[in-house]
Amino acid sequence: MPHFFGYQEVDATEKTARVRDVFSKVAGKYDVMNDFMSVGVHRLWKRQFVRRINPRAAHKILDVAGGTGDISFLVYDTSGGADITVSDINPEMLQVGQARAADHGLVGKLRWAEANAETLPFEDNSFDIYTIAFGLRNVTHIDQALREAFRVLKPGGKFYCLEFSKPVIAPLRKFYDAYSFNVIPKLGEIVAKDRDSYQYLVESIRQFPHQQGLKIRLEDAGFKNVTFENLSAGIAAIHCGVKI
Ligand SMILES: C[S@@+](CC[C@H](N)C(=O)[O-])C[C@H]1O[C@@H](n2cnc3c(N)ncnc32)[C@H](O)[C@@H]1O
């Protein structure tokens, strides 16, 4: 199966290395860029994601590709202190996350783990909830990551993914494409001094499976009751599945 870094066909090793390089480079500007690019809308999507998860203090939760911690911080606050592990392949993103956790008064409240979503260093059947937000698109072997998600969840455990998807309204698609390809790389150049990483971002969104395609991949990994919910008319979507 071919692998893509944005629109470029690359081998698996190169994809992993180049994605790692992207996030090492953008880590320091990652959060401010999210606000600029989405004019703050990513915060609303993340809140809706966590509302849907409906976490409780008794839950053991794994936030994969957790990056600088947005989802874990919201989950912690909403749940009233769940046992959360933030994991990510990239140490620079985790470092920014740990510094932000200190600013949020969350020192010592979260576990942190450097880990690849494809080879998680956790026991079988050990989490109630698995989350991955804007992470799956960047993983080299998506199906392997989904099988790992299934493995580490307890029976009855739930999988939640928040990811860019396909806008379902045609006129919106045109506007969205124009904005993505013209504005976002430019913003990357001005704000993060890194046009290429943001060009990768918009291309990687187009290469990622759409709503129905991701649903099938989740079912193939073993998940049941797979559903999805479009956000902002499908610019992003939340997928959910259960390990029965
Ligand atoms: C767009 S950021 C999302 C961060 C955070 N979840 C959020 O919503 O703001 C994508 C993250 O995926 C991580 N990542 C990429 N490939 C990964 C892999 N194979 N395993 C784990 N994390 C990965 C990157 O290091 C980066 O931190």
Image (cartoon, helix red, strand yellow):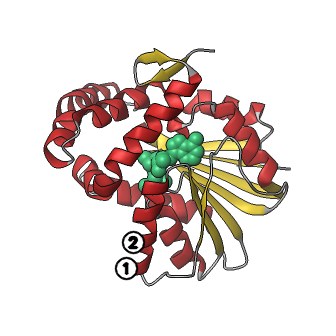
Query: Crowdedness of circle 2 by 10 Å Cα count: few (<14), some, many (20+)?
Result: some
Look at the numbered disc 1 and give the secondary structure of its residue.
Answer: helix
Quarter of the figure with residue 229: top right
Residue linked to disc 1: 103
Residue drawn at point x = 84 percent, y = 57 percent: 125
Q: Quadrant of the N terminus?
A: top right
Asked where in the image residue 148 lies, by quadrant, the reply is: top right
Please, what is the three-letter code of the amino acid marked with disc 2? Arg
In the rendered image of this protein, does residue 116 appear above or below residue 31?
Answer: above
Q: Name the residue at 18% across, 43% down.
A: 193
Q: Residue at x 32, y 48 (%)?
A: 26
> Does residue 223 lie above or below 8 as drawn?
below
Task: Describe residue 32's horizontal placement relative to residue 209 as left or right.
Answer: left
Using the numbered discs, state the Cα–Cα distance from disc 2 to disc 1 in whole angstroms: 5 Å
Question: Does ligand 1 reach within 8 Å of label 1's beta carbon?
Answer: no
The quarter holding residue 199 reads: top left
Disc ID at residue 100: 2
Horizontal side, residue 205 vs residue 180: left or right: right
Q: Are marks 2 and 1 in contact (CB under 8 Å)?
A: yes
Depth check, front residue: 99 or 182: 99
Whether 160 is drawn above or below 236: the answer is: below
Kind of element beneath mark 2:
helix
